[in-house]
């Protein structure tokens, strides 16, 4: 196993011993067999020297143990890479960015601390998965929905820290979290929002608290270890229906998107939609399968009272009818609660708040995501389509670029391109090069990634360069203040602590 | 005029000269007549020594001038208190927290930089008021709504920096802002979110950007000077209707609130509601006037297609009908766009996105707000009512405490109590004492303020004390890193820079 950068073997051995005293010997892993489980088996650096190899892993069970682990890491200047549960597929798995990192594995902190039906909220630890919380809620017959992302094994806290999205009206996970507990590198346990009131009654109800609202700086960052997080849940609605709209002509795309965004921005459509071009779609989500000869198709999910969702779908049809040849198809229709039989047959469980693993049906290859944000407007989508079509043609990537804009977040679309990762060094090198060039081309055209794979964090942050990198400079100023020894995930998303900061061109 | 703390008269005179070189002599104010305009004429310290008196004011016209002003302030260690336009009534006006402060007045930076109809967004400078933006949008016949708070003269940027709220579905102003430009004390101009991409196409569309999401730390804080802010606007909906629900029995309050919160949390009710007890209400907002013999009343605002809002109101009636004796009254009903005649007659213009000054009709006394957050649940409201009824009885405040919960934010209620401020030293002293005790009592029972008056910032922050004040300690760590000379609003919301940090008990 590699050593942490700049740490001597004997010191590291002492540190491992102290980690053991903190969490129990059996929860410190340093054998090659154990540690290799944290590597990315579909790393874009497969069989290359750059492939990061952790030095060890330590799995605390409590906030106090996290504090102890941080203390030891500070003493020996050992970099820690925090993970919890789930796989982070497409974005680098559980693997760290630099060899010699010690994995801070929070999966043992898996307590559902509270589910409050009256306030429609919950408080969980990082090791709680969407599946765990769903089971807990079902067992207690609580009439609340959670909002799962594609794979249900993920951590609510982890997904939200990476600013992931789902499918129901609560789909923007950061927006629908409420309150955090964070252990800072100096061991301070900070509760954000109303949690800073010792007797707090609205920690999971009011996000901002009093004074600066800190939560955002603990997402996609390396400033602290989040040990608790609150979430807003949605009271079970009466009904859910999905409608599908298709239009026959390519050139009506801008108007099609403008109507869709009007419906989203006025609150008529409250779940995630996807826009499929040509004969595409029918894949994950599956809401637009069989679009046939349509040029463009989208799914419209509605949630609420039966009479309201019916009126919303009628309203949407009214709006889209102005496009010549628009056709409409009624999709799934549910009244809640569902019977177990109904749940078994459901095509797209995440859209009704049921976490699952169907996303992985039949998949075995590795892949990485390139996920830029594009405008949610007709003109904006058209322009982005041209830019990426040209980029892929220029770069010689096989196949055409399908932009399938998805409304995981309000007011903009995420488009996700998939790059294969193979057990083939030469192909991986080519794909990495292509990915890096795509990051640059996208940025030159005004599109930035909302999140990226561990291997490309430096490239992505490099493009967020306004004011001679004033944003990154600010991140690093905060990093140095909160983590003076630079122990937490040095280099994550391009943020380096002073002692490891590289000379930049 | 007082001098800034620790600054010699001669140095201050040099500083004023340099401010003049930065912004033009005519935009530096140091005569008593000019400077007194920035004082609070209804200060709770009226005619007492503690009443803060600014030393001067400086009004830059551009980002470059803001940078210059900060440079001079750093050189002489002069505290700056940033304001823009509007009055901040009830929370301290434009006055600073300490005497000798120089006002950084941004009202000349009043450009509407962009209103984008396709993306339903805008980008404005701090000096742009809700009235300004409304006029701009009307003049260009753009079909977008903004979300005004009660008085329309306020600044969009200023209100959002203090985390204010309005009345339409875009009522949580922080949640519906998108992207900032901030000048840091060191002069760095930082663009947050997608604005850090020099060619950004989604600065006003996607909030979070890449890496840590910083925006929250520039609200209710003293870490930077916000010079631009983007906002999501709402496309003009087809219709708006309001319904009023009343119930006759006090004891049905919990069920009443639970149904209301169900409707809010499932997205059926998307605007701000108020819950009025007894014969109360009918005041600002005015949505529940004439409740008569009802024990509890609330207004339900609906926005969207005509058929959708009708269905939502029917759905709400279905739900509330389970409470014995519930009665329903149709309220205002509009189809958009409105004629000028209709606009003139409208009772509650803010609820349809029209900023105005009717809030001040007939008011002349001074007042300060005490604004704790309480849960949005039946049980939670009942408990809060008991706590505050008892507190007011114990403290001997005249009159009974009406808690009128208001849903300015998702998932919780704000309750606003008004304290009179008089031109009477003795009464003001009593009221200050009462306010301070109320802050403590509220906190002991788990309720914290979402924002407070300048005079009570220290008291409020003192209650957010979890982990031996770990949150405040974190704020001050960030403060020292970003503002090492402690020039921006030292002490705002209880956050002091190192050089002025007081020994705390």
Image (cartoon, coloured by chain):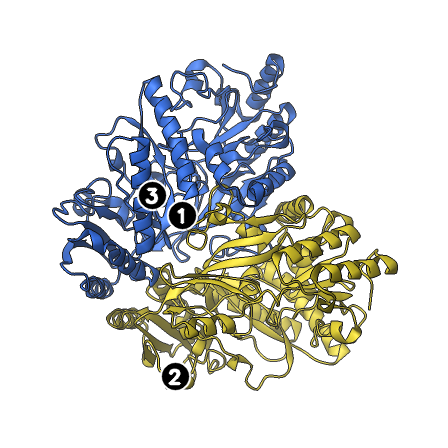
Chain colours: A yellow, B blue
Asked whether the viewer can see residue A259, the reply is yes
Whether tag 1 and tag 3 are in contact, CB under 8 A, the answer is no
Give the residue drawn at x 37%, y 84%. Answer: A342
Residue B359 percent coordinates (x, y): 26, 36
Chain identifier of the residue bearing label 2 in the image: A
- Secondary element type, mark 2: helix
Residue B420 percent coordinates (x, y): 30, 28
Q: How far apart are marks 1 and 3 (CA)?
A: 29 Å
Depth order, front residue of B443/A75: B443
Using the rendered view, name the quadrant where residue B314 is placed.
Answer: bottom left
Q: How far apart are marks 2 and 1 (CA)?
A: 41 Å
Give the residue drawn at x 36%, y 77%. Answer: A244
Given this view, does label 2 or label 1 mark the residue nearer the observer? 2
Is residue B232 placed above or below B130 in the rendered structure? below
Whether tag 2 and tag 1 are in contact, CB under 8 A, the answer is no
Residue B293 percent coordinates (x, y): 12, 47
Given this view, does label 1 or label 3 mark the residue nearer the observer? 3
- Secondary element type, mark 3: helix
Chain identifier of the residue bearing label 3 in the image: B
Mark 1 burial class by Cα count in 10 Å: few <14, some 14-19, many 20+: many
Asked whether the viewer can see residue B336, the reply is no
Is residue B96 placed above or below A278 in the rendered structure? above
Is residue A459 placed above or below B498 in the rendered structure? below
Q: Do labels 2 and 1 share a chain?
A: no
Mark 2 burial class by Cα count in 10 Å: few <14, some 14-19, many 20+: few
**Residue wearing tag 2:** A340
Q: Are marks 2 and 3 on the same chain?
A: no
Using the rendered view, name the quadrant where residue A379 is placed.
Answer: bottom left
**Residue wearing tag 1:** B173
Q: Do labels 1 and 3 share a chain?
A: yes
């Amino acid at each position: 196993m590699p050593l942490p950068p700049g740490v001597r073997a004997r010191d590291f051995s002492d540190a491992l011993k102290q980690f053991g005293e903190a969490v129990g010997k059996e929860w410190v892993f340093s054998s090659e067999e154990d540690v290799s489980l944290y590597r990315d088996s579909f790393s874009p650096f497969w069989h290359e020297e750059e492939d990061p190899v952790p030095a060890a892993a330590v799995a605390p069970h409590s906030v106090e143990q996290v504090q102890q682990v941080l203390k030891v890491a500070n003493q020996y200047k050992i970099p820690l890479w925090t993970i919890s549960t789930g796989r982070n597929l497409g974005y680098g798995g559980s693997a760290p960015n630099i060899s010699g990192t010690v994995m801070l594995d929070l999966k043992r902190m898996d307590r559902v601390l509270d589910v409050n039906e009256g306030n429609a909220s919950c408080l969980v630890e990082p090791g709680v998965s969407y599946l765990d919380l769903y089971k807990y809620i079902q067992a207690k017959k609580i009439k609340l929905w959670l909002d799962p992302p594609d794979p249900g094994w993920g951590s609510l806290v982890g997904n939200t820290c990476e600013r992931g999205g789902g499918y129901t009206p609560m789909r923007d996970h950061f927006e629908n979290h409420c309150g955090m507990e964070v252990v800072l590198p100096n061991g301070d346990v900070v509760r954000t929002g109303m949690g800073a009131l010792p007797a707090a009654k609205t920690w999971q109800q009011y996000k901002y608290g009093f004074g600066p609202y800190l939560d955002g700086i603990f997402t996609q960052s390396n400033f602290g270890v989040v040990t608790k997080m609150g979430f807003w849940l949605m009271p079970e609605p009466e009904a859910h229906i999905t409608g599908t709209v298709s239009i026959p002509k390519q050139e009506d795309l801008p108007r099609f998107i403008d109507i869709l965004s009007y419906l989203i921005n006025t609150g008529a459509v409250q779940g995630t939609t996807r826009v499929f071009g040509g004969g595409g779609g029918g894949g994950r989500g599956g809401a637009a399968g069989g679009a046939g000869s349509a040029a463009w198709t989208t799914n419209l999910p509605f949630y609420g009272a039966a009479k309201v969702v019916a009126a919303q779908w009628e309203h949407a049809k009214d709006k889209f009818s102005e496009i010549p040849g628009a056709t409409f198809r009624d999709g799934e229709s549910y009244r809640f609660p569902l019977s177990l039989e109904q749940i078994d047959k459901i095509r797209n469980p995440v859209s009704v708040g049921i976490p699952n693993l169907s996303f992985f049906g039949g998949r075995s290859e590795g892949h990485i995501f390139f996920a830029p944000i594009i405008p949610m407007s007709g003109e904006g989508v058209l322009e982005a389509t041209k830019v990426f079509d040209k980029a892929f043609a220029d770069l010689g990537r096989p196949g055409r670029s399908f932009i399938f804009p998805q409304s995981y977040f309000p007011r903009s679309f995420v488009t996700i391109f998939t790059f294969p990762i193979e057990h083939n060094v030469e192909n991986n090198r080519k794909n990495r090069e292509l990915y890096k060039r795509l990051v640059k081309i996208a940025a030159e055209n005004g599109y930035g990634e909302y999140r990226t794979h561990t291997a490309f964090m430096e490239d992505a942050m490099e493009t967020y360069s306004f004011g001679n990198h004033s944003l990154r400079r600010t991140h690093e100023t905060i990093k140095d203040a909160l983590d003076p020894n630079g122990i937490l995930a040095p280099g994550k998303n391009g943020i380096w602590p002073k002692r490891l900061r590289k000379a930049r061109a």
